[in-house]
Each structure stands twice: as C-alpha cells, then as structure tokens.
C-alpha cells in the first residue's frame, strides 16, 4: 500500500514534546507480590553478579558505606536498592533498564559494565527458571505487531523523532547502521545457516581522536565503505535498476545513482523521506532516484522488477511473523539474473527461539515491533519460501560495537543541543542506555551484524 504523506499521530508518542517517544515510566506498586518478587530478584541478581567480572556496589542515597560484591571489573552503583530490586522483580530485564532511567542505579562505564553479563546472558539465570520465561516475560502488544496497519506508527516512533537529533551524532553521510572500518577479513568456519565460506571482518582499532566538527573523516569513509561493498555485492553499475527497501537519509540511493543506476527507494518515515529527497536533489540525482512513502508489502503489485534489491538493517523491523512475506516480496520483484544484498542484525538461533514473541526493553522504548532474526532462519525461510539462495556473508559485529561507541560518545557530548531540541533528561538516559546496551550486545558477541548476498537458485 502507498501511504498518505502526513505527520504521525501525536498521541502515539511522536511529535515535539519533552519526552518524545518515551513511554511514561510505570509507578511501582507495593504489596505482597512486589515484596516477594523483589526478594527473588535480589537473590538471583547477587548470585549472578558473584560469577561475573564486575563490581556492584549497593550504596543507598544518604549512606556513607556501600556493600560491594562481584569478582571485580566495571562498576555498577545501586543508589536505591529497594526500587532496583522491585523493578527487576516485577519486570525482569525491562525493569533493569527502567531502574537505570529513574536513576536507581548508574555506571560510569555503562557499555563496559553491560558487556560482561551480555556475554553470558544465556546462563546467568538457572536453567529451571529459564523454562518459566514464557510465563513471566511480557508479550509483544498487538498494536506493536508489524502489520500494514501498525508499521508506519512503529517506524515513526523512532525515525520521526527529529532529523536534527540524528544529525547531532551521526557522521556526515547520515548513515544509521554499522560502518565498515576496513575490508580486511578472515575466513570463518560455517555455522548453522551460514554459507560455507563466509567471512568475518577484522576488528577495527578504536579511535578517540578529537572531533570538533562532530564527525571524523574516517567515520564517514567507513560508512561509505559499507555502502559501496553492498552495491558491489548486488552488482550495481551503469543502467542497473535498483530497489532499496528502507531509505534512511538517502546515502545509499545517492551512491547507487552516482554509479549510473536508477533507484526506487521506499520508506515509512516521513521525516527521513523529506530530508532524503533534499539530499538527493542537492547531489544532482533527483532525475535518477524516486523516494516513496510505501510499505514493502505493496512492492511488485504493478509488475515492476529490479536488477538489484538492497536493504540496510530494515529486516529487524519486519517482525518474525512477516519474515516470509519480506523475502517473498523481494523474490517477486527481483528480475532474472538479479542479486540481493542486505545488511542484517542477527542473534544466535537458540536465543532467537528462546526470546521470540516476548517484549524487551528495546521494543518498549526504542523499536516497537522489532525482533532480530538468526542467519539460520533467514537461510531456512529463503530456501523454503523463495527461489533466493544465500551465497555470501560478511560478519562485522565488532565494527558495530565501534560504530555505537562513537555514536554514544557524540550523543553524550551533545547533551545541551539535544535538550535545546525539546528533549528532557529522561530521554537522554533512555538513549545513552540504548546505545550502550546495543554496544554491549555486539562487543560480547550476543548479537551480530552481517552483509548477506543472495542470488536466484535457477541462475
């Protein structure tokens, strides 16, 4: 379906208000259930921390002494233990994140602290209790399912916050996805769902060079390198008909047009569409690039086909129940002899199965309706439901950890500018936690990102 080019419903949490896009923090409810769940949470949390290379200090506000436990390492300080354990007891990992938002706990090196438990997240809770996960983890709300009716609101919740906000911490290409800092790589043994000769990008060297103009030349180059590799994988050259699913702010479309391609790019973000069109016109490619506010499911209904289909970190917003629809749509619009190149954030298959259908802190506060696939399930779906076959894979999770580290550093440095846009201190803590939490996921290997290349089985 083609959507109306209008502003999102302000009642859905978007629009220029101080806590834009941030759901109201739930008030703690006292009573026996909260007391019991807090006691259980305290016992489980302390047992887990004692097995980790971290330090947790319980230092209640107004107290001169603090109780420390853990094996030593990045430090977390719990300022309001009663609130912290109550929130964790009532809402698990969502409550853990919410307790950070209220200031019940803090950490000077937030990403460093979170990386340690992230590396062992599958074993921190005793296995018998893990079996109860489905009974205690909140389900994804129906209005967050990525249906055709809900998807624009889900996307708008995050991407229509403010173009000015994103320009404060992104590089000059306005790329909001993992950079590729160099192209050196090593072969990796094939895992479930991966291609036999898939590659792993060599970890980049962290950079802490001064950044007075809010962007580093090498960062913009790394973002460009990511895009150029995807275009190479998809075979984009002079005359190629390109479909891009998920426009972002237009950098991929500009680079494809620069190669002589014609580009049809679709998005569900009103804000991104408007700025992308401006950037494309400024680059001189308005005659080669069409950007449209359209749901990916409506593609191909007019019989239009493309030589190359590209999509950068968009599958994460599709939702597990629609992965088949996403790849069948791509299969439908891919011309004979065409190629597909996508960049996808993934998680291990067993963790995907264990967490499927549940709501996470990221769902609630950042990406409603989002869920990460595994490479294995992508391979399985394309084999079972399409003629597409996974033929190339470059893992680059360490590059995303560095990308997020740079974004977070810039975002924190721009705190006053973020406030000047109308966002409040809760929003700042939400986003610092989001960027640090994500960095920890990639740094620990709990989540990964890959460039995946597909061709048709009959080619």
Image: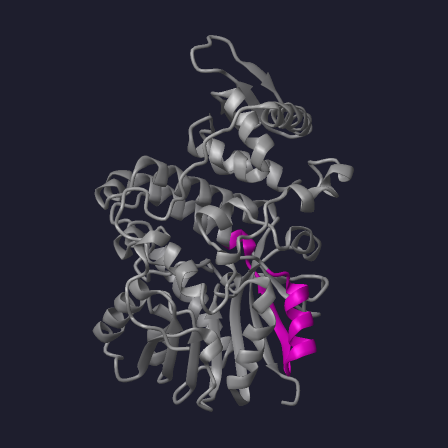
The residue lying toward the viewer, choosing from 94 and 435, is: 94
Specify whether 299 is left or right of 387. left
Residue 392, given in percent of the width and then of the height, sits at 61, 72
> Where does the magenta region start and end?
373-399
Quadrant of the frame with the C terminus: bottom right
Indicate left or right for 166 with 82 as reference. Answer: left
Q: Residue furthest right?
A: 128
The answer to whether residue 78 is above or below residue 364 is: above
**Colour convention:** one colour
Residue 372 placement (x, y as % from top left):
57, 58
Q: Which residue corresponds to the image point at 68% horizontal and 44% vertical from the top-left? A: 135
Report x, y in % for residue 437.
50, 43
Please say if 365 is above or below 296.
Answer: above
Give me the residue at 53% from left, 79% from top. Answer: 330
Residue 205 visible somewhere in the drawing:
no
Q: Is residue 94 visible?
A: yes
Q: Position of residue 65 (x, y in %)?
A: 50, 9
Of residues 77 and 40, the one nearer the viewer is 40
Residue that protrudes farthest toward the top in the picture: 64
Magenta run includes residue 302: no
From the image, which quarter does the N terminus lie in? bottom left
Query: In the rendered view, does 17 fall on the left or right side of 50?
Result: left
Q: Toward which corner of the image does residue 127 lie, by quadrant?
A: top right
Compared with 334, 188 (above or below) is above
């Amino acid at each position: 379906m083609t959507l109306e080019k209008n502003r999102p419903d302000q009642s859905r949490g978007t629009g220029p208000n101080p806590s834009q896009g941030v759901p109201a923090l739930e008030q703690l409810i006292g009573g026996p259930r909260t007391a019991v769940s807090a006691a259980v949470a305290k016992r489980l949390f302390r047992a887990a921390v004692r097995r980790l290379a971290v330090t947790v200090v319980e230092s209640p506000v107004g107290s001169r002494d603090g109780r420390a436990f853990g094996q030593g390492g990045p430090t977390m300080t719990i300022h309001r233990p009663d609130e912290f354990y109550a929130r964790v007891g009532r809402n698990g990992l969502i409550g853990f994140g919410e307790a950070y938002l209220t200031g019940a706990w803090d950490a000077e090196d937030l990403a460093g602290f979170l990386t340690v438990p992230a590396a062992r997240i599958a074993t921190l809770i005793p296995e018998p209790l893990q079996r109860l996960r489905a009974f205690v983890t909140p389900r994804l709300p129906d209005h967050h399912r990525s249906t055709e009716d809900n998807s624009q609101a889900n996307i708008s919740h995050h991407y229509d916050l403010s173009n000015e906000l994103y320009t404060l911490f992104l590089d000059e290409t306005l790329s909001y996805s993992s950079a590729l800092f160099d192209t050196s790589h090593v072969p990796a043994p094939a895992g479930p769902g991966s291609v036999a000769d898939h590659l792993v990008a060599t970890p980049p060297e962290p950079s802490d060079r001064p950044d007075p103009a809010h962007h580093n030349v090498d960062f913009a180059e790394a973002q460009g390198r990511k895009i150029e590799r995807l275009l190479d994988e998809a075979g984009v050259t002079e005359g190629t008909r390109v479909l891009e699913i998920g426009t972002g702010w237009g950098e991929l479309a500009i680079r494809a047009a620069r190669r002589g391609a014609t580009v049809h790019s679709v998005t569900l973000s009103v804000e991104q569409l408007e700025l992308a069109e401006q950037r494309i016109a400024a680059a001189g490619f308005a005659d080669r690039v069409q950007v449209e506010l359209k749901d990916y499911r409506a593609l191909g209904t007019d019989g239009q086909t493309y030589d190359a289909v590209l999509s950068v970190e968009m599958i994460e917003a599709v939702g597990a129940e629609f992965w088949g629809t996403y790849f069948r749509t791509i299969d439908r619009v891919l011309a004979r002899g065409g190629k597909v190149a996508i960049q996808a954030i993934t998680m291990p298959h067993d963790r995907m199965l264990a967490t499927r259908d549940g709501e996470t802190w990221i769902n609630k506060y950042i990406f409603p309706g989002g869920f990460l696939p595994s490479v294995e399930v992508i391979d399985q779906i394309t084999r079972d439901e399409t003629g597409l076959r996974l033929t190339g894979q470059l893992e680059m999770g360490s590059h995303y950890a560095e990308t997020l580290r740079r974004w977070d550093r810039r975002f924190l440095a721009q705190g006053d500018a973020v406030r000047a846009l109308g966002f409040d201190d809760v929003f700042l803590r939400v986003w610092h936690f989001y960027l640090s939490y994500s960095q920890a996921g990639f740094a620990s290997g709990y989540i990964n990102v890959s460039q995946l290349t597909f061709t048709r089985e009959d080619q």
